[in-house]
């Protein structure tokens, strides 16, 4: 978590589309972005495996994202992000990573992914920025984490 938190534009785009994008759509965009970082694209069958959904469900969701101009969906199941989709995807991945990292610092190990998923779709950008700042503080001062752990055990 040493890089800049998120692009302002990614957040603005997400906010503009908040009434349109469901939590599930956000999960798809985040996963497509995450996977596209190495490959540049992703296939329907890969997305369905990564998100543990049927290929037909993944196809329907990707078609919706395509209609919104967030992904390009080509024949044979190849999906790539548009510029806007990529910016939102970057924000979504960084939001996920910030929350997960914060929860790890708190010592959350049981159901870490579930806890992260539950929080990421409802957290405000202000709270997210504050979590990010707090994780930076805790990184710079590991003694605070040790003190926190000591207090937890009292």
Image (cartoon, rainbow, N blue to C red):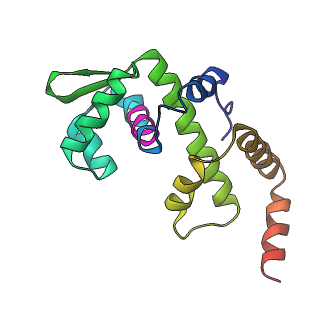
* Residue at x-position 78% and y-position 43%: 130
Q: Nearer the viewer, residue 91 or 151?
A: 91
Residue 126 drawn at (x, y percent): 76, 39
Q: Is residue 27 magenta?
A: yes
The quadrant of the image that shows the C terminus is: bottom right
| Residue 91 visible, this orientation | yes
User: Furthest-bottom residue in view?
Assistant: 154
Q: Is residue 10 left or right of residue 129?
A: left
Q: Residues in magenta?
A: 26-33
The location of residue 88, given as percent across then percent down, is 52, 27
Q: Is residue 113 left or right of residue 5?
A: left
Marker count (numbered): 0
The residue at the point 64 percent across, 45 percent down is: 98
Q: Is residue 10 magenta?
A: no
Farthest residue toward the front? 19
Judged by its main secondary structure, the magenta piece is helix
In which quarter of the view is residue 37 placed?
top left
Outermost residue to the left:
76
Query: In the rendering, at what x and y percent does residue 62 appear?
Result: 30, 32
123 shown above or below 113: above
Residue visible at 58% across and 37% down in the picture: 94
What x and y, as percent, mark residue 112? 54, 62
Residue 40 lies, with reference to residue 126, above or below; the image says above
Comparing 127 with 134, the one in front is 127
Residue 71 in sight from this viewpoint: no
* 2 on left or right of 36: right
- The residue nearer to you, when weighing 84 against 137, is 84
Lateral position of residue 78 relative to residue 27, left or right? left
């Amino acid at each position: 978590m040493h890089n800049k938190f998120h692009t302002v534009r990614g957040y603005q785009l997400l906010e503009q589309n908040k009434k349109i994008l469901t939590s599930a759509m956000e999960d798809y965009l985040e996963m497509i972005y995450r996977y596209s970082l190495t490959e540049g694209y992703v296939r329907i069958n890969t997305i369905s495996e990564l998100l543990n959904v049927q290929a037909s469900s993944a196809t329907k969701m990707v078609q919706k994202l395509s209609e919104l101009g967030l992904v390009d969906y080509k024949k044979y199941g190849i999906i790539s992000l548009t510029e806007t989709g990529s910016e939102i995807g970057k924000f979504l991945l960084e939001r996920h990573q910030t929350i997960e990292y914060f929860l790890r610092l708190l010592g959350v190990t049981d159901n870490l992914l579930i806890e992260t998923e539950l929080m990421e779709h409802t957290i405000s950008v202000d709270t997210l920025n504050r979590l990010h700042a707090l994780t930076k503080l805790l990184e710079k001062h590991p003694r605070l984490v040790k003190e926190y752990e000591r207090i937890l055990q009292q």
